[in-house]
Image: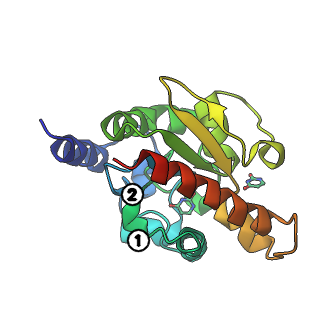
């Protein structure tokens, strides 16, 4: 079976999923989207209100900023694959809970298996701590550093765009400044491993 077909089946399974309570309050599932041949996959936390309404990841205010970050290195959304740890919106935009992330994990892992990226870019602390299986992570010291994950795959932590909305300064050393550095490194690795 080809990759596109497998990805469609994963999406279909997500759309039918009732494994955790988040399905009760969702308007739409948000499986993720983009280039399934991308060497880089971006993983956020979970859908917010705009994403829940649209059924698409990163389309709200944080999403607009995320697109700007991509544009800074001439990436478009369609160049990369964009998804989240959980595929349904946690009520009131709270963080997803450990059991919700565990229920949803097989979907993310199946998506990663199909895409087989060289790099997973985690946006914020939630996807980073989830993938590394650590209760807490220091995003400020870990961002911008490559971490060996498994099977030759690397993780590259970046700040979450929502965090940048709360910290709009672009002065040298600010979170935004550092993010604009980080995305250049992502682009460099993408170009090196373009399939
Ligand atoms: N924040 C996330 O973590 N993911 C989205 O899809 C949107 C906002
Ligand atoms: N704390 C977070 O949880 N995420 C960030 O991106 C930065 C600080």
Mark 1 crowdedness (10 Å alpha carbons): few <14, some 14-19, many ≥20: some
Q: Which mark is residue 53?
A: 1
Between 146 and 61, the one nearer to me in the picture: 146
Where 14 sits versus 165, above or below?
above
Please tell me which residue is depicted at 39% across the width and 50% down the height of the picture: 194
Q: How is the image coloured?
A: rainbow
Mark 2 crowdedness (10 Å alpha carbons): few <14, some 14-19, many ≥20: many
Q: Position of residue 98 (x, y in %)?
A: 60, 34
Residue designated by label 2: 30
Which image quadrant for residue 51? Answer: bottom left
Left or right of 17 on screen, residue 26:
right
Between 99 and 24, the one nearer to me in the picture: 99
Q: Position of residue 113 (x, y in %)?
A: 35, 33
Q: Which mark is residue 61?
A: none
In contact (CB < 8 Å): disc 2 and disc 1: no
- Numbered label tally: 2
Please report whichever mark, 2 or 1, sits nearer to the chain's N-terminal start: 2
Please tell me which residue is depicted at 77% across the width and 46% down the height of the picture: 139
Is the CB–ligand 1 distance for label 1 below 8 Å? no
Dot 2 falls on a residue whose secondary structure is loop
Residue reaching furthest front?
192
Q: Position of residue 15 (x, y in %)?
A: 28, 50
Image quadrant holding the N terminus, namely top left
Is the CB–ligand 1 distance for label 2 below 8 Å? yes
The image quadrant where one finds ligand 2 is: bottom right
Residues at marks 2 and 1, CA–CA distance in whole angstroms? 9 Å
Please tell me which residue is depicted at 51% across the width and 42% down the height of the picture: 119
Q: Is residue 42 visible?
A: no
Dot 1 falls on a residue whose secondary structure is helix
Where 116 sits versus 174, above or below?
above
């Amino acid at each position: 079976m080809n990759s596109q077909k497998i990805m469609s089946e994963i999406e279909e399974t997500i759309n039918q999923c009732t494994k955790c309570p988040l399905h009760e309050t969702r308007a739409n599932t948000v499986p993720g989207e983009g280039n399934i041949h991308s060497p880089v996959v971006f993983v956020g936390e979970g859908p917010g209100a705009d994403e829940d309404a649209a059924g698409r990841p990163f389309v709200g205010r944080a999403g607009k900023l995320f697109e700007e970050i991509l544009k800074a290195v001439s990436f478009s959304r369609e160049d990369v694959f964009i998804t989240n740890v959980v595929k349904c919106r946690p009520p009131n935009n709270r963080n997803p809970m450990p059991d919700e992330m565990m229920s949803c994990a097989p979907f993310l892992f199946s998506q990663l298996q199909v895409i087989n990226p060289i790099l997973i870019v985690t946006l914020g602390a939630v996807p980073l701590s989830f993938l590394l299986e650590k209760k807490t992570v220091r995003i400020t010291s870990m961002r911008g550093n490559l971490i060996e994950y498994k099977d030759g795959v690397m993780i590259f932590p970046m700040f979450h765009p929502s965090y940048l909305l709360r910290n709009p300064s672009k002065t040298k050393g600010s979170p935004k400044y550092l993010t604009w550095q980080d995305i250049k490194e992502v682009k460099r690795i993408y170009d090196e491993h373009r399939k």
